Amino acid sequence: MGNRSIFSNILRSGPKRFLRLFKPAEEEYRASASMYQGVDVPKRLELFFADATDACADAIAQDGARARMRANARKVFLSEGCSNHGSFTLGIHVTGTKGPSLSMIPENVPGTSSVNPREPELSLEERSLLESEWFHFAQEIDLSEHIRTAVEALEYDGEIFFQMVFDPQIEDVQFNLQQVEAKRVRFPMESGQNENMVNGIEFCGLHPKNYFVVPKVMNPALDWSWEPEAVPAKDMIHFAVMRLPDQHRGIPWMDPVLYDIAETNLYEGYHLGAANAAARNSGGVLECNPNARISGNGDVKLNPDGMEVWEPNHIKQLKPGVTYKQGNAAWPAGAYGPFIEMKREKHAAGMHLTKAMLTNNFEKHNYSSFRGEMLVYWKTVQYLRERIERMILNRVFDRWMECFAVADPTADAVLQRFRKSKRVPRCWTWEPIPAYDRSDFISSLREAVEAGFMSRKMAVAELGYDFEQVEAERKEDTFGSSESADDPMSGKA
């Protein structure tokens, strides 16, 4: 009762005194908030942060938002030369010219077949059979092209789906991959309140259960007139690189720089228009005698406000008292070049490329600066290759192995032998890129030491370890060099 009377007295004393009780807490909040730049937005930046939200990734990237992002990104991808070239170059570098090769782990190599030394191993005949059959299967379904498309789709769609389907035209295995556009995986009409459904993917706990795919529709107006079909997760491959916590659908990599790329293109167009105007009007009247007249048409005076129009490609004599000056049509200079270069660096960073890869311009590069610029890019290529192995290649291999075991008794015996470990020992060999590969860097250092351009100590300091250590590690990592002639993918068979 006493507490209530105290509270009543505070209210009777006026709202100002009541608010003063909370002033220390408010000041403490502001003091703590001022420690972080992202809490209180300055006035000049309020417009930029006006639509900021802390919603989860799936709430931000709903179907409508992703559809607009994909449409804008594809517009830039298909119409802007640098973005198109950069995306294609990234796909080619990751995939290589022939795609990854299957290398079955050989026998009697300790620590490579499995963590269990008692695990069964593959014989030479089994390895040769599986590698040869996989090579022909990958060629028949054009697996390398599927991988290249998947890498490029990260730029303009942010993701791609592959459905593993039955194909009677593929010899022995009758199994193929069908590309599924990101827009075709979407909500069923009646699943708006299903908490296990996230943007067209139904989850069972932490793992996908079904993917809902609509058929191919050529008319965009009919997209929403089809109900999607549930495809089991075991038959669907979803390739994406998630960037936010608890994110389940990909967004285009180039989305952060889409507006900047479009504005830069407009800026270039304006300067090109200025250059065209300068070229079309390369001269003009500099001085004019007010008393000069044009013969005919009533002796019209020639003055700067009323100039005579001449036809193109005609030579005409100037009137008395008129001075003409020849112009010089040239591309706008000054800050234009450095500004465009700065913009291209920003666009390349937004697309996870380098400026040289985006623009295909290596004019200002020497070998040293080129390698330094490509170190981060080479790490991106390696990361994407690792994700492709885990998300695409291993799943395709497992399904191929199951299908091939039905037609071939040797493959069936291998599958039964490794059924307990749930994984046939294998690794994937990617085509090296000499300009970025570490082995090429080591070879260049060795040649520099032998030619006398640097000391051995300098080379070891730059590399981090000695050449003998490198050679020992490379010998340990090289599997079955004596059987390389039996590999159909080595070109020595």
Image (cartoon, helix red, strand yellow):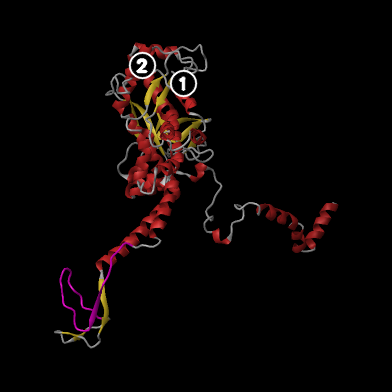
Q: Earlier in the sequence, mark 1 or mark 2?
A: 1
322 magenta-colored: yes
461 magenta-colored: no
Residue 69 in sight from this viewpoint: yes
Q: Position of residue 97 (x, y in %)?
A: 32, 32
Q: Quadrant of residue 174?
A: top left
Q: Residues within 10 Å of mark 1 (few under 14, many from 20)?
A: few
Q: Are marks 1 and 2 in contact (CB under 8 Å)?
A: no
- In the rendered structure, which amino acid carries the disc numbered 2? Glu
Start-end of magenta stretch:
305-331
Residue at x 75% of width, y 63% of height: 16
Which quarter of the image is occupied by the C terminus?
Answer: top left
Residue at x 17% of width, y 71% of height: 311
Above or below: residue 144 compared with residue 48? above
Q: Quadrant of residue 489?
A: top left
Q: Main SS type for the magenta part?
A: loop
Above or below: residue 112 compared with residue 53? above
Position of residue 325 in the picture relative to residue 341 (left or right): left
Q: Kindly identify which residue carries mark 2.
A: 483
| Residue 476 marker | 1
Above or below: residue 481 compared with residue 315? above
Q: Position of residue 280 (x, y in %)?
A: 25, 67
Q: Position of residue 326 (x, y in %)?
A: 25, 72
Q: Check the image and name the residue furthest to the bottom.
A: 291
- In the rendered structure, which amino acid carries the disc numbered 1? Glu
SS assignment at label 2: helix
SS assignment at label 1: helix
Q: Check the image and name the residue furthest to the left.
A: 296
